[in-house]
Image (cartoon, coloured by chain):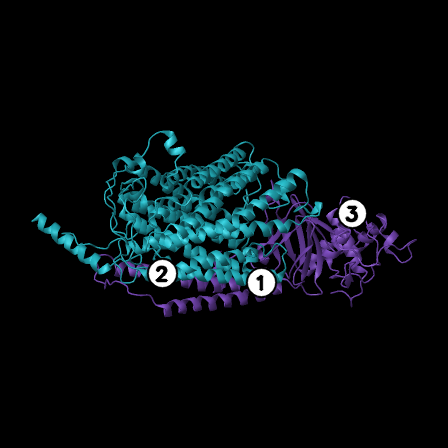
Chain colours: A cyan, B purple
């Protein structure tokens, strides 16, 4: 008999009469008018995958151009448009929605024992807003393009740039309302829809991370909307806000933009931290270390993240005193991140570790996020920042956080919950190999960029002095490896839809409430309302070891 | 140790007084952060080997957490980070305080070139000839969008912002030729807004100076503009009707505004006074000064500022 290794926070659900959510309806209306959070999650998954391919294609072209010092493959204008498309699409249409809207939408109600999010129709409306914004941004990129960079610095964007700046801004503006609606939806859902017994400190850390993320989405995104609206007003009507020739202040834009965009960086990392907490605990079969510290560090990051925007402006001519205040606050915000890394590491202690695909991605996250975070200290250190800001050092730093961190976590989470989402297992061996390929490809692409930046190569350069070529070639080689590594999962995950092994309700013996439902879950998730009586992550490594030994013994006997 | 890194061409050339301090911070950070990263990675690897499923390590369910341990690493991180903050802040403050005797060069960024003008009136485009061991202060502005004046070998960088005067300073310490980059994205030819900085020994520098024809000095050019544009009509004591404030000793003084605010008359103040005269109204004067926004170029404003600054005696200058 198979010893019970660990058990979810509530009893397993009885069989449901309902079909699973994928079979609950087949026509296009059943998808495009759905209010099922799981289907909305799938809609987001497909959309952001498409946006990821567009953003990735732009990046590939840029890396091809940068393989040689001369600007010979693309014109400088096209290159500038490409990094704008890459930035806008990847930030607003892939990274910000990635984990929250795909995994968050799918899992939040399942994890808290609810039948849907608080406002299911609003949830669908979020997706429509996101898509309308996305289509407008794509149209602006293709029909003429925009060359302002994703940062839209004034007065370049408001008075000098040609192209569809206003359309691009409109796309970002509209999709922002989708973000705000999602944030509100998640906050209310977490407050009002938790299952009986599921107190705040019994919530999975992924839910804490989503909650912290939602706070930022709701508080920061409106500032972006206002800022973008002001740029459009200045461009259209000549109202002087940022343009000094109209009496405006170009630095005001940077203050407003980073007041949103720095917290937005945490929108792009907190959910990844949540996923990592789930994965590390599950695959080391160990209770998470320092649950409350990890939970509260998410909130601390969300709050402190609003107070550090000026560290983007150490050489912008803001006052020296402002620079120093923003510097010290930036060091403070790195403390909660450090706490998380230490806690994840300590969680492994005395566990029973299985190096399965999701854990490899989670380790990738921890490793790359650690490097990204530590190099953030270089940038918070004012005098060092003066040298390396606006160089490839910055580019490497934020890619370690946003791609190394968030994309790793997204892939890890996608593999971990793939059986729940689709009912099928992905092929484990290819999954592991590919996780390694992503890791090596990523480091080969972006580590040389740290050195390039320290050597002084400015970012957003279409051509560059010859001495930087070796490192650029390495980076471009890594990028092609990375491109393959990002495409492979697309293939084998699609393959698994048909040929993957059926997963069963809880293939990893994980403890979350989502694992008490069948895979894929029925339309309304839970037949009976789960009642939670214990903390999350009640994994038992000793029992896991015993069960494994028992299993091996049985198999041996069977062979005899 | 650092020289070893130079030898493997890992570090860029170091050619200013600030470069040493910045590099010291950089390598100290590299050591500290490298140590932390190594410790984290070693622990993860170690735990994976020791506690791999089926390994002989002790697999035991965790009960409770250790608040003591949490507080310890929290405080350790905090103290370490604050230490880094203080040591880099010292250098950052040093970067913001040019010595009084610094040689002043005016820089105007425009799409897509760097224009420089020396005190003796000599102009350069995308080049900067400097005397070794002489402290230099750059007074910068931009004519159109934001640019950033970056000399990697000096480890300094400062944005040139339209409508603002900004500054940076350094003392070149090693003769040679160095890259000058625009580091803030400024449009189509951003990556061509580059140039060369030549740091020269005294004799070479002298020779370079002699190569050029005699040019009117910066102050003289400014004075010429002052007369041409009729500034003298209002701002000189012997003007027909003196309608504007006198400019003797204005630079570096405290000016009382019509709303009783007191502002320091620095370069930014003078810049605003010419381009946005309604921004600061001096107490006791009618708001009749017109803007010179579409009349003067950024360079001409800087020249005028140089002239007005020359009207202040040394004691009042900041």
Near mark 2 (Cα within 10 A), the count class, few <14, some 14-19 or many ≥20, is many
Q: Residue furthest top?
A: A27
Q: Quadrant of residue A489?
A: top left
From the image, tell me which residue sits under label 2.
A291
Marks 2 and 1 belong to one chain: yes
Q: CA–CA distance between discs 2 and 3?
A: 63 Å
Which dot, 2 or 3, sits closer to the camera?
2
* Image position, residue B90 (x, y; %): 58, 67
* Image position, residue B27 (x, y; %): 49, 63
Query: Disc 1 sits on a residue from what chain?
Result: A
Which label is found at residue A556? none
Can residue A67 be seen here? no
Marks 2 and 3 belong to one chain: no
Position of residue B116 in the picture relative to residue B222 (left or right): left
Marks 3 and 1 belong to one chain: no
From the image, tell me which residue sits under label 1.
A324
Q: CA–CA distance between discs 3 and 1?
A: 35 Å
Query: Disc 3 sits on a residue from what chain?
Result: B
- The residue under the point 40% across, 69% down is B72
Position of residue B269 in the picture relative to residue A123 (left or right): right
């Amino acid at each position: 008999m198979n010893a019970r290794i660990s058990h979810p926070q509530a009893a397993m659900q009885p069989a449901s009469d309902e079909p699973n959510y994928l079979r609950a309806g087949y026509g296009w209306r059943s998808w495009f008018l759905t209010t099922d959070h799981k289907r909305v999650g799938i809609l987001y998954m497909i959309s952001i995958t498409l946006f990821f391919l567009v953003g990735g294609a732009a990046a590939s072209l840029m890396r091809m151009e940068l393989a040689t010092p001369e600007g010979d493959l693309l014109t400088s204008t096209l290159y500038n448009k490409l990094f704008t498309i890459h930035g806008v699409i990847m930030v607003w249409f892939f990274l910000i929605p990635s984990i929250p809207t795909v995994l968050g939408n799918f899992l939040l109600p399942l994890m808290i024992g609810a039948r849907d999010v608080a406002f299911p129709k609003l949830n669908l409306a979020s997706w429509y807003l996101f898509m309308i914004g996305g289509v407008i941004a794509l149209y602006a990129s293709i029909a003429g393009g925009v060359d302002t960079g994703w940062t839209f610095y004034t007065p370049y964007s408001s008075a000098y740039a040609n192209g569809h700046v206003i359309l691009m801004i409109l796309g970002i503006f509209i999709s922002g309302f989708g973000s705000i609606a999602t944030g509100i939806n998640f906050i209310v859902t977490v407050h009002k829809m938790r299952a009986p017994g599921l107190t705040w400190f019994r919530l999975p850390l992924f839910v804490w991370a989503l909650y912290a993320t939602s706070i930022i989405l709701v508080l920061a995104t409106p500032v972006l909307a206002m800022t973008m609206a002001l740029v459009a007003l200045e461009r259209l009507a000549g109202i002087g806000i940022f343009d000094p020739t109209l009496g405006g202040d170009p630095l005001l834009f940077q203050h407003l933009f980073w007041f949103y965009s720095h917290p937005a960086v945490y929108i792009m990392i907190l959910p990844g931290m949540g996923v990592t907490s789930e994965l590390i605990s599950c695959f080391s079969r160990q209770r998470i270390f320092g649950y409350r510290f990890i939970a509260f560090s998410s909130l601390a990051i969300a709050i402190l993240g609003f107070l550090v925007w000026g560290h983007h402006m150490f050489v912008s001519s803001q006052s020296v005193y402002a620079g120093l205040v923003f510097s010290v606050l930036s060091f403070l915000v790195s403390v909660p991140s450090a706490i998380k890394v230490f806690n994840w590491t300590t969680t492994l202690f005395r566990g029973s570790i299985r190096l399965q695909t999701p854990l490899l991605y989670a380790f990738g996250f921890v490793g790359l996020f650690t490097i990204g975070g530590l190099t953030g200290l270089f940038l918070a250190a004012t005098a060092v920042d003066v040298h390396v800001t606006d160089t490839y050092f910055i580019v490497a730093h934020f890619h370690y956080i946003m791609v190394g961190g968030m994309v790793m976590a997204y892939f890890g989470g996608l593999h971990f919950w793939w059986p729940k989402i689709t009912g099928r297992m992905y092929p484990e061996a290819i999954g592991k190999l590919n996780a390694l390929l992503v890791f090596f490809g990523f480091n080969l692409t972006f580590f040389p960029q740290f050195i390039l930046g320290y050597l002084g190569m400015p970012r957003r350069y279409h051509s560059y002095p010859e001495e930087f070529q070796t490192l650029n070639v390495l980076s471009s080689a890594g990028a092609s490896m990375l491109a393959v590594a990002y495409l492979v999962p697309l293939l084998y995950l699609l393959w698994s839809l048909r040929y993957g092994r059926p997963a069963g309700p809880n293939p990893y013996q994980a403890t979350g409430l989502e694992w008490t439902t069948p895979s894929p879950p029925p339309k309304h998730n839970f037949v009976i309302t789960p009642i939670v009586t214990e903390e999350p992550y009640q994994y038992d490594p000793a029992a896991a070891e015993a069960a494994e030994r028992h299993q091996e013994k049985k198999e041996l006997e069977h062979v005899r | 140790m650092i020289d070893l890194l130079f030898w493997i061409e890992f570090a860029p050339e170091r050619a200013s007084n600030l470069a040493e301090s910045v590099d010291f911070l950089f390598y100290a950070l590299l050591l500290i952060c490298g140590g932390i990263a190594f410790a984290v990675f070693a622990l993860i690897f170690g735990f994976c080997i020791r506690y791999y499923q089926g390994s002989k390590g002790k697999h035991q369910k965790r009960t409770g957490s250790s608040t003591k341990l949490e507080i310890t690493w929290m405080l350790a991180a905090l103290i370490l980070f604050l230490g880094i903050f203080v040591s880099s802040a010292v250098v950052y403050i040093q970067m913001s305080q040019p010595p009084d005797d610094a040689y002043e060069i005016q820089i105007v960024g425009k799409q897509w070139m760097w224009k420089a003008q020396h005190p003796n009136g000599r102009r350069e485009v995308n080049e900067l000839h400097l005397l070794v061991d002489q402290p230099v202060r750059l007074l910068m502005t931009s004519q159109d969008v934001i640019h950033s004046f970056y000399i990697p070998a000096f480890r300094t960088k400062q944005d040139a912002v339209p409508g603002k005067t900004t500054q940076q300073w350094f003392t070149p310490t090693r003769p040679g030729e160095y890259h000058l980059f625009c580091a803030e994205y400024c449009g189509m030819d951003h990556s061509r807004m580059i140039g060369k900085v030549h740091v020269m020994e005294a004799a070479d520098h002298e020779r370079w100076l002699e190569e050029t024809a005699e040019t009117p000095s910066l102050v003289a050019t400014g004075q010429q503009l002052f007369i041409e544009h009729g500034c003298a009509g209002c701002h000189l004591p012997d003007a027909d009707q003196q309608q504007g404030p006198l400019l003797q000793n204005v630079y570096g003084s405290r000016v009382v505004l019509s709303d009783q605010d007191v502002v320091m008359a620095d370069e930014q103040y003078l810049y605003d006074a010419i381009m946005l005269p309604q921004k600061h109204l001096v107490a006791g004067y009618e708001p009749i000064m017109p803007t010179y926004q579409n009349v003067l170029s950024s360079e001409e404003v800087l020249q005028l500022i140089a002239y007005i600054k020359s009207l202040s005696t040394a004691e009042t200058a900041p």
